[in-house]
Amino acid sequence: MSALLEHAPPPPPRSDERREIHPVPPRSDRIFVGAVRTASVSTLVVMGLIGLFLLLRAMPALKVAKWHFLTEHQWLPEVNKFGVASLLWGTILIALIALAVAVPVAFGAALFISEYAPRSLKKLLITLTDLMAAVPAVVYAMWGFFWLQGHLLEVSKFLSDTFGPVLPFLRVDNPDTLSSYSSSAFIAGVAVSAVVLPTITSVMREVFSQAPVSEREGAIALGATKWGMIRTVVLPFGRGGIIGGIMLGLGRALGETIVVFLIISPMFDFTTHPLQSGTNSIAPHIALRSTESSGTALSGLLACGLVLFLFTLLINTAAGFVISRSRSGAATEI
Amino acid sequence: MSTNLPAPGRIRTGGLNPDQLFHLGSAVAGSFALTWMLFERILPVTSPLGFAVSWYALFLTMYAVISATTLDRVGVVDRVVGALVATAGAVLVAVLAGIVVFITIRGKGALAHTNFYTDTLALVGPDDGLTKGGIYSAMIGTFEQVALAILISVPVGIATAVYLNEVGGRLARTVRTVVHAMSAIPTIVAGLFIYAMFIIGFDLPHWLPLLGDRVSLPRSGFAASLALSVSMIPVVITTAEVVLRLVPNGLREASLALGTSRWQTVKGVVLPTARPGLITAVLLGIARVIGETSPVLLVAGYTNALNYDPFHGPQVSLPLFVFNLARQPFDVAIARAFGAAVVLLVLVVIFFATARILGGRAPGQVSARKQRRLSARLARRQLVEGNLL
């Protein structure tokens, strides 16, 4: 027994002295924090550089065009007569048409996924929505150009024939030939709506599914139908998400390049008749002209890019603000 | 005195009840019959789309009217809204299915030829048949550009996510806001930025003599991957940050309580625990940028020739290939564009599905196979230690 004890290691010296604490982090930690901080600062730098270089390279054109850049609708850089006005208007018009088509469908689909679908279907639908958001824009463009356009000509003609007499902006020149309906803002807008549909759906669905269970149960227990429950609990809770989702979709639709590029035929007047062939938009304009431009023309394209950048930044920041407010649960009182 | 009331039937809380099923069925059949009569016998027009729209409108009306026989107004509204909402869900799926089916059908012709995968368009005339030429150079371009984009954006993205989640502070909040803004910039602007900065080039200040006096890149695969990185970095950061947030705090605290430094905790506990999620973040980033066309369009240039070198000369990639051929007035070119679009779609689905399978697991949760391997390793170690004792 005692032999065993002799072989046992000596107990650690007990002391009531205060152990040393190192307030200075070890070197490895300092290097680590420094490295990850550098990485995150570099993303800030990239974002700053984007704004800086676009502004820098756009300056020559902005100096020539001055404030007329925002009001001029022609694009004739050779005679220093160019501006973003008709492009911006076309961009907004196409985005609004896209939203008009996508928002009702996205709203319904989001409600279906979060409230109506059985559990197994729900998982599948969420995956499909996310997959749809990952489908490349060029695939949507091929579909829009080669399939959707052909099918929408008839719809355009129908809309123009039926509502044209009452709503003058739906009229077109040569209403009897189908080709006067092709390459229009309407067709581009509907194609873009397919691109933004999954984005809007997934934002709305996420917010809807966060509506508090206790309140849902309360509504059901008081005898509400499913729709009554949705109307009184889910929708008020998700209001911020609905608005935020729409704005995110708007941001995405404004920057859509390839889909619009393939479909529209560019022109530099204000698009007043969305069913009529011919319109324009900033992003496709940049893509189309960048290879053949130099000097002031190129600088003008960069100025267009700057306008698009600032515009989408504004909308997306606002969207982020609205969504984050709704997620904080500020809209509900429990 | 007790009266024997019959026991009430069980209330069904979900699904379709027989009553509703009957109403639904009769509304569908009735509206179909009426629309058919209108379109085939009465109205002088035939239009499949018009037929579908009228059928749907009539269906909704009939469904409401039939439901009103047993339900009050609130119940009828509930049913009609249910039908509308289900339709919206069906439209979403139909659009996706429609796109996939359409692209596949049109792309089948090109995909059937093996030369499509192994050949380039370098020596192929514009109307040569599908037995000549293919997407090999575009696949090489996509592979190299995406690989370079990964090399640039994954270290930066994951390090930033680690900073946001493990270090934090006021700077982290600013970075998070900016990253959200960055994820929203249109991809064409990302391309334009690389164009403005690197293709046009800029002069370095003379006190920085190491790199020469001017920085500029030709249109090349590398410029394209820089543009792709601008779109990829925010995706990786946002996804990775969510994943890191899921690592249980108890693990971090246990590690720190053992006396490790922050770096050791991150390296030994946080990152290994979050590994599947981090891979998901990378894969989602890849799925996002692999099909980006607009940034590549501005900075990569276009060539039909095979170019293995991403740093010199124009290099084509799959999205650019699709986009360029789709605009040509030759049926063969368009068929090739559809074929390449299918390949692109398949690549996206592969990356997406892998990300889903890995991402479905909680941090720290391992697959059955990995579990077996880990327990085998543990048993071996115990055996060795047992022998030593």
Image (cartoon, helix red, strand yellow):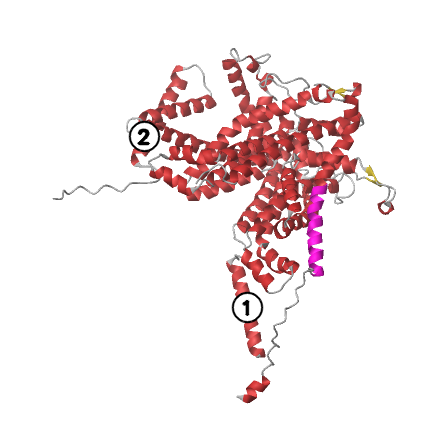
Q: Could you say which quadrant of the image residue B7 lies in?
A: top left
Q: Chain of mark 1?
A: B
Q: Could you say which quadrant of the image residue A282 lies in?
A: top right
Mark 1 residue type: Leu
The location of residue A116, given as percent across then percent down, is 41, 37
The location of residue B286, given as percent across then percent down, is 63, 44
What is the span of residues highlighted in magenta in the rendered image? A26-45
Depth check, mark 1 against mark 2: the one in front is: 1
Mark 2 residue type: His
Task: Relative to B277, say whether B41 is above or below.
Answer: above
Mark 2: give few (<14), some (14-19) or many (20+) Cα within 10 Å.
some
* Badge 2 element: helix
Left or right of B59, for residue B123: right
B179 within the magenta span: no
**Is the magenta region chiefly helix, strand or loop?**
helix
Q: How many marks?
A: 2
Task: Relative to B291, say whether B44 is above or below.
Answer: above
Foreground of the two, A285 or A213: A213
The location of residue B374, given as percent across then percent down, is 55, 64
Left or right of B79, for residue B169: right
* Badge 1 element: helix
Could you tell me which residue is drawn at 51 percent across and 17 percent down? A158
A38 within the magenta span: yes
Q: Chain of mark 2?
A: B
Disc 1 marks which residue?
B378
Task: Point out the tag, 1 or 2, that comes first from the N-terminus.
Answer: 2
Locate the C terminus of chain B and report the quarter of the image it occupies.
Answer: bottom right
Disc 2 marks which residue?
B23
The location of residue A6, given as percent across then percent down, is 58, 86
Foreground of the two, A224 or B110: A224
- Evaluate whether residue B189 shows in this view: yes
Give the Cα separation between the discs numbered 1 and 2.
63 Å
